[in-house]
Image: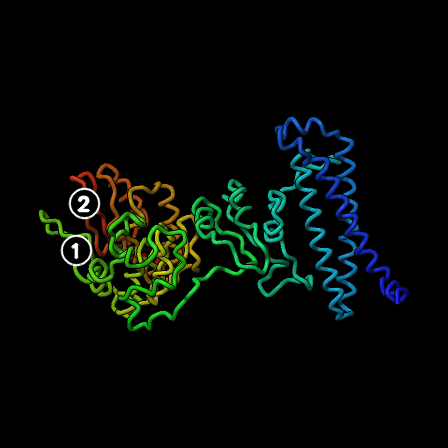
Amino acid sequence: MRKSVLKKFDGFHRFIFIVSILSLLVCITTLSKFYSFKSLVISDTVWKNHITNEGKNEVRETISIIIQKIQQEIMDLRDSSVNSSSPSLSRHSIFLADILGLLESVEASLLSIGGSYSHHKLSDEPADHFLIEEIRKYVKVKPNRLKKQNFMGANGTFTSIGHGCFSMKKELEEYMDYEIDEICNDDWKLAQKLMVHGCDPLPRRRCFSRAPQFYGKPFPISESLWTLPDNRNVRWSQYRCKNFNCLASNSTRKGFFKCADCFNLSYHETPRWIKPLHVDPNSNLTADFLIQEVLDIKPGLLRIGLDFSVGTGTFAARMREFNVTIISATINLGAPFNEMIALRGVVPLYLTINQRLPFFDNTLDLIHTTRFLDGWIDFVLLDFVLYDWDRVLRPGGLLWIDSFFCLKDDLDDYLNSFKMLRYKKHKWVVVPKVDKDDKELYFSAVLEKPPRPFR
């Protein structure tokens, strides 16, 4: 019996076993050289001086040889798998790929600790900036298996992350430190922090997103537009309020101050865009344009659009009643805005201002914005945002600037930013912001994108 077992342990399995033992020894050697107790009590700079160049080069050369051997074995396995459907070959290939990834991580850490070796400089590959294996696997180019261009005309898949990820390495590695095939950490707030600070897009993850423990059926569309959703359908762990009634009551500072009342569907939200809410008593002017007034500018031609605002989907809900489909772009600033929008039965788009709009050129009929682009925004950033909005608006599409407010002294500069679009003015009004003692002003406009034929 024992002999038969030994016979089955053929040369292929021996190689796997030897590689595993050798990899383990290399990792132990590396850790003993670079992460001894002494490294816990003195700085990296001082400890590096105690590591001899000869010892470092020896470990690095050994790792390099092992990596080359494993890469060659993986290539041989792939060639063998073409003529074989054995599941063991696939398992062994995956096993070797994981060992290879670990060794490359060790090699990268040695580079970062001890500088270059064998007269090579550090790689510019994004994967070499991180130690968490899931990040390294994600950002590496994924070549097509058939070694041909795919239907998109590329030889591989080039996954990307935002440039801000490199300056937030610690936070990103925390975000990507998880168990594959398990439930993800409850860390959406960390993810949003990364996105807001330029780590956008975030890498994908191979774990299952957390869901509310007792998720119930959403209300039918006939009820959901103007009814507070079921509290069970939101994960409340990262919010100050723990239910929608708390948000709607506005009894404490519990969310984004610009939208403190927007969870109050019955009182605050219902009249919006149906009747003017704020009329200047001196001029009898208002910055509140009504939906019907705007739709009458282009009768029957406004069908799809984007609302880039802070809100709970009320604009999209109202436009739905006029048979116009609106996507609501926002993030969760202190309250579950995206969950609320979705549970009301309209479409949320979880998007920061840092990111290019995910729409093709000249495709949208309408872009609406309120409570978002205000006097806080940098003029250069505003230019980039407006030009991106111009990109996705079709010729003849409308840009609806809704109650943009800023300091009186800054108004001309901001108005010039909108004027540089050279849009046709259908509506254009400036009124005082009454709660700021005439120091701030409201600006609202409805502007039409010109045709701009090819020159």
Mark 2 nearby-residue class (10 Å; few <14, some 14–19, many ≥20): many
Q: Quadrant of residue 26?
A: top right
Residue at 67 percent across and 28 percent down: it is: 47
Q: Nearer the viewer, residue 104 or 357?
A: 104
Residue 157 in the image: state x and y as whole percent: 60, 57
Marker disc for residue 277: 1
Q: Which kind of residue does numbered mark 2 sit on?
A: Lys
Residue ID for mark 2: 433
**View extreme (front): residue:** 1
Q: Residue at x 28, y 40 (%)?
A: 413
Query: Secondary structure under badge 1?
Result: loop
Label 1 amino acid? Leu
**Residue, x 62% and y 33% (percent of image)?**
40
Residue nearest the observer in this picture, 230 or 153: 230
For disc 1, the neighbor class at 10 Å (few under 14, some 14 to 19, many from 20) is few
- Residue 358, relative to residue 61: is it above or below? below
Q: Is residue 213 visible?
A: yes
Q: Quadrant of the C terminus?
A: bottom left
Residue at the (17%, 55%) spot, across then down = 277
Q: Who comes first in sequence, dot 1 or dot 2?
A: 1
State the separation of the CA atoms marked 1 and 2.
13 Å
